[in-house]
Image (cartoon, helix red, strand yellow):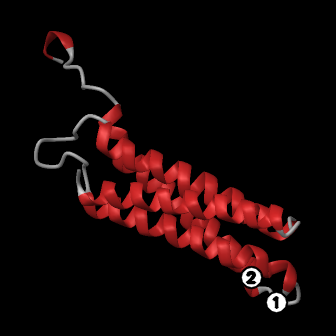
Amino acid sequence: MPTIIRWYVKSALLYLACAFGMGVWQQAAARSGTLTPVYWHLFLVGWLTQLIFGIALWMLPSYTREQPRRSDPLNWAVYVTLNAGLLLRAVAEPLRPVQADNAFWGWALVVSAVLQWLAALGFVVNTWERVRGPRRKPRGGR
């Protein structure tokens, strides 16, 4: 299994454990509110999306024999960008209401969303040709 895929899957497992741990802590401490969005982001983006990205890179048809996952540098950029956006969100989300007079945390959430969007866009760009299917040659020599 290629290194990038192992990183995706191991990170997904770590986020799953963190999300469920946060869920248990919220219930045990009777807390909700500001940490609920962090729980859902850790679960859906950290666990589910990251696992999907990793398994898709592994299971989808090869782009070429020389570049089976198309662009490995782009795959690493997607991984880093997705995780940077997720971790920034995990920090900024609970601090924004606590420090409501500080606009920094609101902007940090915007940057977090942009980073995650860029990661999704990079994944789509890098994966599109692998699922598009073979190109058909025109009939009649055209």
Left/right of residue 47 with respect to residue 11 in the rendered view: right
Residue for point 31% across, 36% down = 60
Q: Residue at x 66, y 63 (%)?
A: 21
Viewer-closest of 71 and 53: 53
* Amino acid type at image mark 1: Asn
Q: Is residue 90 left or right of residue 79?
A: right
**On the image, numbered disc 2 is attached to which residue?**
105
Residue under circle 1? 102
Residue at disc 2, secondary structure: helix
The answer to whether residue 45 is above or below residue 134 is below
- Figure check: 107 above or below 66: below
Q: Amino acid at mark 2?
A: Trp
Q: Is residue 47 above or below residue 80?
A: above
Residues at badges 1 and 2 in contact (C-beta under 8 Å)?
Answer: yes
Would you say 47 lies left or right of 5 here?
right
Q: What crowding class fits label 2: few (fewer than 14 Cα within 10 Å), some (14-19), or many (20 or more)?
A: many
Q: Looking at the picture, does residue 99 appear above or below residue 93?
A: below
Tell me the distance, in whole angstroms, between the alpha carbons under discs 1 and 2: 7 Å
- Quarter occupied by the C terminus: top left
Q: Quadrant of residue 86?
A: bottom right
Using the image as rendered, state which of residue 79 and residue 29 is in the foreground: 29
Percent x, y for residue 63? 22, 41
In the rendered image, which quarter is residue 129 located in?
A: top left
